[in-house]
Amino acid sequence: MVAIKTDNTIKPFLRWAGGKNWLVKHLDLILPKDGFNNYHEPFLGGASMFLSIYPKNEAFLSDLNRELIETYSTLKVNPEGIIDILRTFENTEKFYYQIRERRYEDPLEQAARFVFLNQTSFNGIYRVNLNGKYNVPYGYRTKDFLEAEKLRLVSKRLKNATLDYGDFTIVESRIQKGDLVFLDPPYTVSHNDNGFIKYNQKLFSLDDQKRLSDLIDFIKAKEAFYILTNAAHKTIEEIFDKGDRVLKINRASLIGGANAERGQTTECIFTNISK
């Protein structure tokens, strides 16, 4: 196994609902002390965990959001191409809606579009309509949407990563003894509440949570490590009760909006990594 050296110097280049930047400062309490072999993350999102954990061996990264994975894949091989296109874009309402209406065949142009919309949209939300069309309104942000050096650094970090599009069960064929699997599914239920919450294009149902529980059984049978983040809710705690370590962490709520609850929320971290 390779010893762990966390690195918080490279930040995500995307704004992502449900992102785990808040978890970075707690990693030393969670990660295996003697290290791990390969790294797997099937709910990649903004990639804050991958960038902070900095796996030295192979990393297998995936997500059900095809546009997201295509953007990472393009950034991995040609960050300068994306940067050059972004330099021609304008952070104006008119230009935003022009770009939002376009679809590109060229991977570089499409990746630049994805980054631009993410950085200039309202709250950085990824949302599409029933026809799969991105429909988030303009965000009126004054912050520069082009962070060239951050894009270059993330591209370098992706060099040893294999990127795939698909359901989280894609990891099963690659998990080996001593690997680490980080699981950050879309939350089906809101924190300490019976209400439902929808972050992504497709609701992650309770049946999906149960499938994820089956995946954890598979990971443990392979003698690999898992870390799961999920809402602190009795239903979730019952589904993932495997006699393993459970931590509860309070954090500030990061999702805004007119009807959003603000203040402290509690999240659960489930893991078979001992103290």
Image (spheres, grey):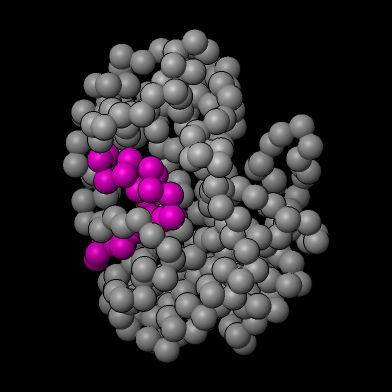
Residue 125 shown left or right of residue 178 in the figure: right
Q: Residue at x 49, y 10 (%)?
A: 94
Is 58 inside the magenta-drawn segment? yes
Instruction: Identify which residue is drawn at 41% across, 12% down.
Output: 90
Q: Give the answer, above or below, for where 147 lies relative to 270.
A: above
Whether residue 239 appears in this view of the structure is yes
Q: Is residue 64 left or right of residue 70?
A: right
Q: Nearer the viewer, residue 3 or 175?
A: 175
Magenta residues (range): 47-75
Q: Quadrant of the N terminus?
A: bottom left
Q: Is residue 43 left or right of residue 201?
A: left
Residue 21 position within the rendered picture, expressed as x and y whole percent measured from the top left: 52, 48
Q: Quadrant of residue 61?
A: bottom left
Q: Is residue 62 left or right of residue 31?
A: left
Q: Is residue 231 shown above or below 263?
A: below
Q: Residue furthest front?
A: 131
Q: Position of residue 54 (x, y in %)?
A: 33, 57
Q: Is residue 244 above or below residue 41?
A: below
Residue at 65% of width from left, 50% of height from top? Answer: 198
Give the x, y percent position of residue 208: 57, 68
Q: Nearer the viewer, residue 242 or 112?
A: 112
Q: Position of residue 129 (x, y in %)?
A: 56, 38
Q: Is residue 149 visible?
A: no
**What residue lies at 44% left-to-right and 23% top-to-bottom?**
101
Q: Nearer the viewer, residue 75 or 98?
A: 98
Query: Which quadrant of the figure has residue 254?
Result: top right
The answer to if 70 sits in the magenta stretch is: yes
Q: Nearer the viewer, residue 145 or 24?
A: 145
